[in-house]
Amino acid sequence: IQNTMMGVPHRRLFYAISMISCLTCKMSAQIFAAPANDACDNAITLRPSEQEVVLGSTINATANDGLNFCGDNFVNSPGVWYLYQLPSGIDKKIVQISTCTAQTNFDTAVTVYSGVCSQLECLNGNDNDQECDAGTDKHSTISWHAAPEVAYYILVHGSLQEHNGDFGLLVTETEPLGSDDDTPDDGYKSAATSSCVLNAWLFALMVPSLAMLYG
């Protein structure tokens, strides 16, 4: 006679319990798994699009030690990484990355770096975009001049250490004003340069009149 417990053979009961435990472990691992782009080395490549929103989440992401301050941001909160890189043979672009979308549900910050993951160099960071179309300053927008063949690493993270959630990322690129030869790194001709040119032009017009007056 086979020993049973509650009408089920011991061996079958053991298999059933084992299967339930295995499924529970797998579900727990999936629930608490870090995002695929949690590390800089696993950054997801971004493509510019004026319509497509890139969906992401910082839930279960890990903090990035050693980055400290960059732009407006103190980078001590969990975040996820993206990569933006223009191909060779094209002109530089003005790139804008924003969490100013309906899909963003927490207080974000966006920080941009150049270089390699093992030695990142701060480019800039933005915490609050007060002109965001979504009507909140909890979203973030940052723009910079991207040169071809340069790797730019974008970290989307919380404004504070306890901030995390889901977000929608919008990536756009536009042509800079002027040509590459006369456009400085900030994308616009400086006011000082324009003022000097204007003053020189006015002086040149005044020289003949002064010569006639005092000649």
Image (cartoon, rainbow, N blue to C red):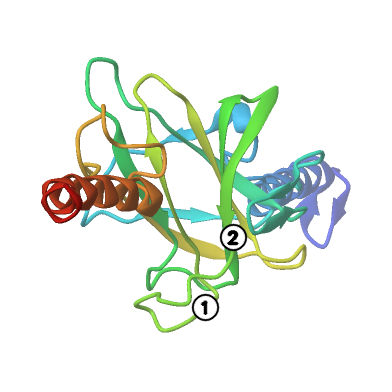
In-front residue for pair 13/21: 21
Task: Give residue 133's position: percent from left, percent from top.
Answer: 34, 77
In-front residue for pair 110/212: 212
Task: Give residue 122's position: percent from left, percent from top.
Answer: 63, 38
Q: Quadrant of the N terminus?
A: top right
Q: Amino acid at mark 2?
A: Ala
Residue under the point 32% across and 43% down? 94
Q: In the image, is residue 6 above or below residue 110? A: below
Mark 2: which secondary structure? strand
In-front residue for pair 46/135: 135
Q: Is residue 213 left or right of residue 88?
A: left
Q: Amino acid at mark 1?
A: Asp
Mark 1: which secondary structure? loop
Task: Give residue 27's position: percent from left, percent from top.
Answer: 65, 51
Give the Cα separation between the discs numbered 1 and 2.
11 Å
Tag 1 near tag 2, CB within 8 Å: no
Q: Earlier in the sequence, mark 1 or mark 2?
A: 2
Q: Is residue 211 left or right of residue 58?
A: left
- Residue 203 in view here: yes
Residue under the point 13% across and 49% down? 205
Task: Give residue 212's position: percent from left, percent from top.
Answer: 11, 50
Q: Residue furthest front?
A: 215
Q: Residues within 10 Å of mark 1 (few under 14, many from 20)?
A: some
The circle on residue 33 is none
The circle on residue 109 is 2
* Mark 1 lies on residue: 137
Q: Residue furthest bottom?
A: 135
In-front residue for pair 58/149: 149
Q: Is residue 23 left or right of residue 202?
A: right
Residue under the point 82% across and 62% down? 6
Q: Residues within 10 Å of mark 2 (few under 14, many from 20)?
A: many
